[in-house]
Image: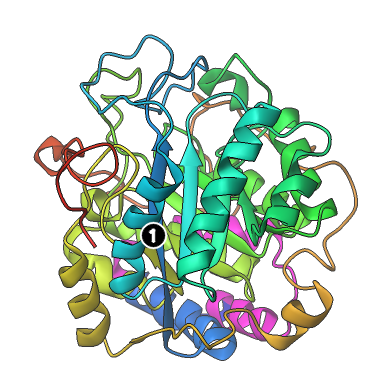
Amino acid sequence: MDLLNTLVDKGLRRETPTREEALAVLATSDDDVLDVVAAAGRVRRHWFGRRVKLNYLVNLKSGLCPEDCSYCSQRLGSDTGILKYTWLKPEQASRAAAAGLAGGAKRVCLVASGRGPTDRDVERVAGTIAAIKEQHQDVEVCACLGLLSDGQAERLREAGADAYNHNLNTSEATYGDITTTHTYADRVDTVRRAHAAGLSACSGLIAGMGESDEDLVDVVFALRALDPDSVPVNFLIPVEGTPLAAEWNLSPRRCLRILAMVRFVCPDVEVRIAGGREVHLRTLQPLALHLANSIFLGDYLTTEGQSGRADLEMIADAGFEVEGADEVTLPAHRSAAGGGCGADAGGGACGADAGGGRDAARTDAVPADDVPTDSARTDAARSDLVAVRRRGAGTDLPPNA
Protein backbone atom coordinates (compact mmCIF):
# COMPACT_ATOMS: atom_id res chain seq x y z
CA MET A 1 0.00 0.00 0.00
CA ASP A 2 1.57 3.29 -1.09
CA LEU A 3 0.21 5.07 1.99
CA LEU A 4 2.07 2.76 4.37
CA ASN A 5 5.32 2.90 2.41
CA THR A 6 5.16 6.69 2.53
CA LEU A 7 4.49 6.70 6.28
CA VAL A 8 7.35 4.31 7.00
CA ASP A 9 9.76 6.49 5.01
CA LYS A 10 8.59 9.58 6.88
CA GLY A 11 8.82 7.83 10.23
CA LEU A 12 12.40 6.75 9.64
CA ARG A 13 13.24 10.38 8.77
CA ARG A 14 11.23 11.85 11.69
CA GLU A 15 9.12 13.70 9.17
CA THR A 16 5.57 14.75 10.01
CA PRO A 17 2.79 12.93 8.12
CA THR A 18 0.03 15.03 6.67
CA ARG A 19 -3.33 15.14 8.44
CA GLU A 20 -4.84 13.31 5.47
CA GLU A 21 -2.32 10.49 5.87
CA ALA A 22 -3.01 10.21 9.60
CA LEU A 23 -6.75 10.10 8.95
CA ALA A 24 -6.24 7.48 6.26
CA VAL A 25 -4.54 5.17 8.80
CA LEU A 26 -7.64 5.32 11.00
CA ALA A 27 -9.83 4.62 7.97
CA THR A 28 -8.07 1.46 6.80
CA SER A 29 -10.15 -1.70 6.74
CA ASP A 30 -9.88 -4.74 8.98
CA ASP A 31 -8.37 -6.58 6.00
CA ASP A 32 -5.41 -4.20 6.16
CA VAL A 33 -4.84 -4.13 9.93
CA LEU A 34 -1.87 -6.51 9.88
CA ASP A 35 -0.27 -4.48 7.09
CA VAL A 36 -0.72 -1.32 9.17
CA VAL A 37 0.83 -3.00 12.23
CA ALA A 38 3.76 -4.31 10.19
CA ALA A 39 4.46 -0.88 8.71
CA ALA A 40 4.27 1.02 12.01
CA GLY A 41 6.27 -1.80 13.59
CA ARG A 42 9.19 -0.99 11.29
CA VAL A 43 9.23 2.55 12.62
CA ARG A 44 8.96 1.36 16.22
CA ARG A 45 11.85 -1.10 15.83
CA HIS A 46 14.02 1.46 14.05
CA TRP A 47 13.94 3.80 17.05
CA PHE A 48 13.39 1.39 19.96
CA GLY A 49 14.38 -2.09 18.82
CA ARG A 50 12.43 -4.84 20.58
CA ARG A 51 12.65 -3.27 24.03
CA VAL A 52 9.52 -2.73 26.16
CA LYS A 53 9.73 -0.24 29.00
CA LEU A 54 7.72 -1.14 32.10
CA ASN A 55 6.08 1.55 34.21
CA TYR A 56 4.30 1.16 37.54
CA LEU A 57 1.51 3.32 38.95
CA VAL A 58 1.22 4.27 42.62
CA ASN A 59 -2.03 6.06 43.44
CA LEU A 60 -0.99 8.40 46.26
CA LYS A 61 -4.50 9.78 46.86
CA SER A 62 -7.61 8.14 45.47
CA GLY A 63 -10.99 9.73 44.81
CA LEU A 64 -12.04 12.94 46.57
CA CYS A 65 -11.52 15.01 43.40
CA PRO A 66 -13.37 18.33 42.79
CA GLU A 67 -13.05 18.13 38.98
CA ASP A 68 -15.85 16.82 36.73
CA CYS A 69 -13.91 14.89 34.05
CA SER A 70 -16.55 12.63 32.49
CA TYR A 71 -14.21 9.68 31.94
CA CYS A 72 -12.87 9.53 35.50
CA SER A 73 -14.03 7.25 38.31
CA GLN A 74 -12.58 9.73 40.83
CA ARG A 75 -14.62 12.70 39.55
CA LEU A 76 -16.72 15.05 41.63
CA GLY A 77 -19.81 13.31 43.01
CA SER A 78 -18.99 9.93 41.44
CA ASP A 79 -20.66 6.79 42.77
CA THR A 80 -18.32 4.19 41.31
CA GLY A 81 -17.38 2.15 44.37
CA ILE A 82 -13.66 2.83 43.99
CA LEU A 83 -11.16 2.96 46.84
CA LYS A 84 -11.07 6.39 48.46
CA TYR A 85 -8.22 7.46 50.70
CA THR A 86 -6.10 10.51 51.41
CA TRP A 87 -2.33 10.81 50.96
CA LEU A 88 -0.20 7.72 51.44
CA LYS A 89 2.75 8.20 53.76
CA PRO A 90 6.17 8.17 52.06
CA GLU A 91 7.02 4.74 53.44
CA GLN A 92 3.70 3.33 52.20
CA ALA A 93 4.28 4.72 48.72
CA SER A 94 7.85 3.42 48.73
CA ARG A 95 6.68 -0.10 49.58
CA ALA A 96 4.09 0.04 46.80
CA ALA A 97 6.71 1.23 44.34
CA ALA A 98 9.11 -1.53 45.37
CA ALA A 99 6.59 -4.16 44.23
CA GLY A 100 6.52 -2.73 40.72
CA LEU A 101 10.30 -2.36 40.57
CA ALA A 102 10.70 -5.98 41.64
CA GLY A 103 8.48 -6.93 38.70
CA GLY A 104 10.78 -5.20 36.24
CA ALA A 105 9.48 -1.63 36.12
CA LYS A 106 12.08 1.10 35.62
CA ARG A 107 9.72 4.06 36.08
CA VAL A 108 7.35 4.72 38.98
CA CYS A 109 4.46 7.09 38.31
CA LEU A 110 3.21 8.88 41.43
CA VAL A 111 -0.36 10.01 40.88
CA ALA A 112 -2.76 12.00 43.05
CA SER A 113 -6.33 12.99 42.32
CA GLY A 114 -7.34 16.63 42.43
CA ARG A 115 -7.26 19.82 40.38
CA GLY A 116 -3.63 20.46 41.26
CA PRO A 117 -1.26 20.32 44.21
CA THR A 118 -0.86 22.90 46.94
CA ASP A 119 2.70 23.83 47.83
CA ARG A 120 2.30 21.60 50.89
CA ASP A 121 1.28 18.73 48.60
CA VAL A 122 4.40 19.28 46.50
CA GLU A 123 6.54 19.06 49.65
CA ARG A 124 4.70 15.87 50.61
CA VAL A 125 5.45 14.34 47.21
CA ALA A 126 9.05 15.52 47.45
CA GLY A 127 9.37 13.45 50.62
CA THR A 128 7.90 10.45 48.85
CA ILE A 129 10.34 10.80 45.94
CA ALA A 130 13.22 10.94 48.43
CA ALA A 131 11.98 7.80 50.20
CA ILE A 132 11.74 5.88 46.92
CA LYS A 133 15.11 7.01 45.58
CA GLU A 134 16.81 6.24 48.87
CA GLN A 135 15.96 2.58 48.28
CA HIS A 136 16.18 2.57 44.47
CA GLN A 137 18.71 5.10 43.21
CA ASP A 138 18.32 4.33 39.51
CA VAL A 139 14.53 4.45 39.34
CA GLU A 140 12.83 7.06 37.17
CA VAL A 141 10.08 8.93 39.00
CA CYS A 142 7.23 10.62 37.16
CA ALA A 143 4.78 12.82 39.08
CA CYS A 144 1.17 13.33 38.01
CA LEU A 145 -0.52 15.76 40.36
CA GLY A 146 -2.77 17.84 38.12
CA LEU A 147 -2.41 21.47 37.10
CA LEU A 148 0.85 23.11 38.21
CA SER A 149 1.30 26.68 39.45
CA ASP A 150 4.39 28.87 39.58
CA GLY A 151 7.49 27.19 40.95
CA GLN A 152 5.96 23.76 41.53
CA ALA A 153 7.54 22.01 38.56
CA GLU A 154 10.93 23.40 39.59
CA ARG A 155 10.44 22.16 43.17
CA LEU A 156 9.58 18.67 41.93
CA ARG A 157 12.69 18.66 39.73
CA GLU A 158 14.82 19.69 42.72
CA ALA A 159 13.27 16.88 44.75
CA GLY A 160 14.41 14.31 42.20
CA ALA A 161 11.43 13.93 39.90
CA ASP A 162 12.50 12.95 36.39
CA ALA A 163 9.23 13.50 34.54
CA TYR A 164 5.79 15.02 34.83
CA ASN A 165 2.60 13.60 33.30
CA HIS A 166 -0.39 15.67 32.29
CA ASN A 167 -2.51 14.39 29.42
CA LEU A 168 -4.36 16.52 26.88
CA ASN A 169 -6.88 13.65 26.63
CA THR A 170 -8.86 14.87 23.61
CA SER A 171 -8.95 17.62 21.01
CA GLU A 172 -9.30 21.27 21.92
CA ALA A 173 -12.59 21.44 20.01
CA THR A 174 -14.23 18.69 22.03
CA TYR A 175 -12.58 19.25 25.40
CA GLY A 176 -15.47 21.25 26.83
CA ASP A 177 -17.80 18.30 26.22
CA ILE A 178 -15.66 16.15 28.52
CA THR A 179 -14.64 18.55 31.31
CA THR A 180 -15.99 21.93 32.45
CA THR A 181 -14.02 22.63 35.64
CA HIS A 182 -10.77 23.41 33.79
CA THR A 183 -9.79 24.04 30.19
CA TYR A 184 -7.69 22.49 27.47
CA ALA A 185 -5.44 25.55 27.68
CA ASP A 186 -4.85 24.82 31.38
CA ARG A 187 -3.52 21.40 30.43
CA VAL A 188 -1.27 22.75 27.70
CA ASP A 189 0.11 25.28 30.19
CA THR A 190 1.04 22.55 32.68
CA VAL A 191 2.88 20.49 30.05
CA ARG A 192 4.84 23.59 29.09
CA ARG A 193 5.68 24.32 32.74
CA ALA A 194 7.08 20.80 33.13
CA HIS A 195 9.17 21.24 29.98
CA ALA A 196 10.49 24.62 31.12
CA ALA A 197 11.53 23.21 34.49
CA GLY A 198 13.69 20.55 32.87
CA LEU A 199 11.32 17.67 33.56
CA SER A 200 10.72 15.09 30.87
CA ALA A 201 7.21 15.87 29.65
CA CYS A 202 4.71 13.01 29.44
CA SER A 203 1.37 13.78 27.80
CA GLY A 204 -1.13 11.65 25.96
CA LEU A 205 -4.76 10.99 25.14
CA ILE A 206 -7.84 8.93 25.87
CA ALA A 207 -9.51 7.20 22.92
CA GLY A 208 -13.04 5.85 22.91
CA MET A 209 -14.97 8.79 24.40
CA GLY A 210 -17.15 9.24 21.33
CA GLU A 211 -14.65 11.44 19.48
CA SER A 212 -14.32 11.61 15.71
CA ASP A 213 -11.27 10.56 13.72
CA GLU A 214 -10.54 14.25 13.25
CA ASP A 215 -10.48 14.74 17.01
CA LEU A 216 -7.97 11.91 17.43
CA VAL A 217 -5.70 13.33 14.77
CA ASP A 218 -6.05 16.83 16.23
CA VAL A 219 -4.94 15.78 19.71
CA VAL A 220 -2.02 13.71 18.42
CA PHE A 221 -0.80 16.58 16.23
CA ALA A 222 -1.17 18.91 19.22
CA LEU A 223 0.94 16.51 21.26
CA ARG A 224 3.58 16.45 18.57
CA ALA A 225 3.74 20.24 18.69
CA LEU A 226 4.21 20.12 22.50
CA ASP A 227 7.04 17.60 22.01
CA PRO A 228 6.65 15.29 25.04
CA ASP A 229 9.17 12.50 25.49
CA SER A 230 6.40 9.98 26.16
CA VAL A 231 2.83 9.72 24.88
CA PRO A 232 0.51 7.45 26.86
CA VAL A 233 -2.44 6.16 24.83
CA ASN A 234 -5.36 5.34 27.11
CA PHE A 235 -8.43 3.48 25.94
CA LEU A 236 -11.50 4.57 27.89
CA ILE A 237 -12.42 2.19 30.70
CA PRO A 238 -16.20 2.72 30.96
CA VAL A 239 -16.65 2.47 34.71
CA GLU A 240 -20.22 2.19 35.99
CA GLY A 241 -21.22 5.41 37.72
CA THR A 242 -19.37 7.73 35.32
CA PRO A 243 -21.09 9.75 32.56
CA LEU A 244 -19.24 7.73 29.89
CA ALA A 245 -20.12 4.31 31.27
CA ALA A 246 -22.13 3.48 28.13
CA GLU A 247 -19.38 4.49 25.69
CA TRP A 248 -18.13 1.23 24.15
CA ASN A 249 -16.74 2.60 20.88
CA LEU A 250 -13.58 0.55 20.44
CA SER A 251 -12.69 -2.77 18.89
CA PRO A 252 -9.24 -4.39 19.16
CA ARG A 253 -8.61 -3.54 15.49
CA ARG A 254 -9.61 0.09 16.05
CA CYS A 255 -7.15 0.30 18.97
CA LEU A 256 -4.34 -1.03 16.78
CA ARG A 257 -5.07 1.59 14.12
CA ILE A 258 -5.01 4.36 16.74
CA LEU A 259 -1.67 3.18 18.12
CA ALA A 260 -0.24 2.95 14.60
CA MET A 261 -1.36 6.49 13.82
CA VAL A 262 0.30 7.77 17.00
CA ARG A 263 3.52 5.95 16.11
CA PHE A 264 3.58 7.43 12.60
CA VAL A 265 2.97 10.97 13.91
CA CYS A 266 5.44 10.65 16.82
CA PRO A 267 7.93 8.09 15.51
CA ASP A 268 10.82 8.57 17.97
CA VAL A 269 8.80 9.08 21.15
CA GLU A 270 8.04 6.59 23.91
CA VAL A 271 4.51 5.49 23.01
CA ARG A 272 2.94 3.82 26.01
CA ILE A 273 -0.13 1.59 26.03
CA ALA A 274 -1.83 2.85 29.17
CA GLY A 275 -5.24 2.22 30.74
CA GLY A 276 -7.78 0.00 29.03
CA ARG A 277 -5.57 -2.30 26.97
CA GLU A 278 -6.98 -5.43 28.62
CA VAL A 279 -10.55 -4.20 28.14
CA HIS A 280 -10.31 -3.20 24.48
CA LEU A 281 -7.25 -4.88 22.90
CA ARG A 282 -7.92 -8.13 24.73
CA THR A 283 -6.27 -11.04 22.90
CA LEU A 284 -4.61 -8.67 20.43
CA GLN A 285 -2.47 -7.05 23.13
CA PRO A 286 0.73 -8.75 21.83
CA LEU A 287 0.23 -7.14 18.41
CA ALA A 288 0.16 -3.74 20.09
CA LEU A 289 3.74 -4.27 21.29
CA HIS A 290 4.80 -3.90 17.65
CA LEU A 291 3.48 -0.32 17.84
CA ALA A 292 4.16 0.85 21.39
CA ASN A 293 7.44 0.45 23.26
CA SER A 294 6.09 0.98 26.77
CA ILE A 295 3.29 -0.36 29.00
CA PHE A 296 2.07 -0.14 32.56
CA LEU A 297 2.74 -3.22 34.64
CA GLY A 298 -0.11 -4.61 36.73
CA ASP A 299 -3.04 -2.52 37.96
CA TYR A 300 -4.12 1.04 37.18
CA LEU A 301 -5.25 3.83 39.48
CA THR A 302 -8.73 2.59 40.34
CA THR A 303 -9.19 -0.51 38.16
CA GLU A 304 -7.39 -3.82 37.86
CA GLY A 305 -5.16 -4.85 34.99
CA GLN A 306 -4.03 -8.33 34.06
CA SER A 307 -1.49 -9.92 36.36
CA GLY A 308 2.06 -8.65 36.25
CA ARG A 309 3.24 -12.16 35.48
CA ALA A 310 0.91 -12.30 32.47
CA ASP A 311 2.37 -9.00 31.24
CA LEU A 312 5.91 -10.40 31.40
CA GLU A 313 4.90 -13.65 29.68
CA MET A 314 3.14 -11.70 26.93
CA ILE A 315 6.26 -9.65 26.26
CA ALA A 316 8.48 -12.73 26.09
CA ASP A 317 6.05 -14.75 23.99
CA ALA A 318 5.77 -11.92 21.44
CA GLY A 319 9.57 -11.90 21.01
CA PHE A 320 10.23 -8.67 22.90
CA GLU A 321 12.40 -8.01 25.94
CA VAL A 322 11.96 -5.90 29.06
CA GLU A 323 14.09 -2.76 28.94
CA GLY A 324 16.78 -2.82 31.60
CA ALA A 325 17.39 -0.12 34.20
CA ASP A 326 20.76 0.62 32.60
CA GLU A 327 19.31 1.13 29.12
CA VAL A 328 18.34 4.55 27.79
CA THR A 329 14.76 4.58 26.55
CA LEU A 330 14.88 7.44 24.05
CA PRO A 331 17.00 7.63 20.89
CA ALA A 332 20.28 9.50 21.29
CA HIS A 333 19.12 12.63 19.48
CA ARG A 334 16.22 13.07 21.92
CA SER A 335 18.23 12.21 25.02
CA ALA A 336 21.01 14.63 24.13
CA ALA A 337 19.21 17.57 22.57
CA GLY A 338 15.55 17.27 23.48
CA GLY A 339 14.55 17.32 19.82
CA GLY A 340 12.37 14.77 18.12
CA CYS A 341 8.68 14.29 17.76
CA GLY A 342 7.68 17.95 17.60
CA ALA A 343 10.99 19.52 16.68
CA ASP A 344 9.95 20.16 13.11
CA ALA A 345 6.23 20.63 13.74
CA GLY A 346 4.52 23.52 12.04
CA GLY A 347 3.68 26.74 13.85
CA GLY A 348 0.40 27.77 15.37
CA ALA A 349 -1.27 27.13 18.71
CA CYS A 350 -1.70 23.51 19.76
CA GLY A 351 -4.92 22.17 18.33
CA ALA A 352 -5.79 25.51 16.75
CA ASP A 353 -7.07 23.81 13.62
CA ALA A 354 -9.09 21.16 15.44
CA GLY A 355 -12.29 20.38 13.62
CA GLY A 356 -15.56 18.75 14.59
CA GLY A 357 -17.07 18.38 18.03
CA ARG A 358 -17.35 15.18 20.02
CA ASP A 359 -20.71 14.35 18.49
CA ALA A 360 -19.71 15.25 14.95
CA ALA A 361 -20.27 12.59 12.32
CA ARG A 362 -17.18 10.61 11.38
CA THR A 363 -15.72 11.65 8.03
CA ASP A 364 -12.63 10.46 6.22
CA ALA A 365 -10.12 12.76 4.53
CA VAL A 366 -9.72 10.46 1.53
CA PRO A 367 -12.36 9.15 -0.88
CA ALA A 368 -14.12 6.00 0.22
CA ASP A 369 -13.11 4.17 -2.95
CA ASP A 370 -9.41 4.84 -2.20
CA VAL A 371 -9.30 3.73 1.43
CA PRO A 372 -11.88 1.26 2.76
CA THR A 373 -13.93 2.47 5.68
CA ASP A 374 -13.96 0.67 9.01
CA SER A 375 -17.20 -1.25 8.84
CA ALA A 376 -16.63 -3.00 12.17
CA ARG A 377 -15.56 -0.08 14.29
CA THR A 378 -17.02 -1.28 17.58
CA ASP A 379 -17.44 -4.53 19.41
CA ALA A 380 -19.94 -5.59 22.04
CA ALA A 381 -19.50 -4.12 25.51
CA ARG A 382 -17.27 -6.20 27.77
CA SER A 383 -18.10 -4.75 31.17
CA ASP A 384 -17.04 -8.08 32.69
CA LEU A 385 -13.45 -6.98 32.03
CA VAL A 386 -13.81 -3.85 34.17
CA ALA A 387 -12.96 -4.52 37.83
CA VAL A 388 -12.46 -1.90 40.52
CA ARG A 389 -9.05 -2.19 42.18
CA ARG A 390 -9.24 -3.74 45.65
CA ARG A 391 -5.54 -4.47 46.25
CA GLY A 392 -2.27 -2.59 46.47
CA ALA A 393 -2.00 1.06 47.51
CA GLY A 394 -4.65 2.07 50.03
CA THR A 395 -5.35 -1.53 51.09
CA ASP A 396 -3.74 -4.23 53.23
CA LEU A 397 -3.50 -6.61 50.27
CA PRO A 398 -0.32 -7.07 48.20
CA PRO A 399 -0.22 -5.18 44.89
CA ASN A 400 -0.42 -6.72 41.45
CA ALA A 401 3.05 -6.48 39.95
Left or right: residue 37 versus residue 253 is right
Towards the viewer: 349 or 372: 349
Residue tagged 1: 56
Rendered view: 235 above or below 355: below
Rendered view: 161 above or below 117: below
Q: Position of residue 279 (x, y in %)?
A: 22, 48
The amino acid pointed to by label 1 is Tyr
First to last magenta residue range: 3-32
- Residue 90 is at least partly visible in this image: yes
Towards the viewer: 254 or 332: 332
Q: Position of residue 58 (x, y in %)?
A: 39, 48
Towards the viewer: 287 or 2: 287
Q: In what element is the residue under mark 1?
A: strand
Residue, x 57% and y 80% (percent of image)? 329
Tell me which corner region of the image, top left, top right, bottom left or bottom right, holds residue 71. Answer: top left
- Residue 353 is at least partly visible in this image: no
Crowdedness of circle 1 by 10 Å Cα count: few (<14), some, many (20+)?
many
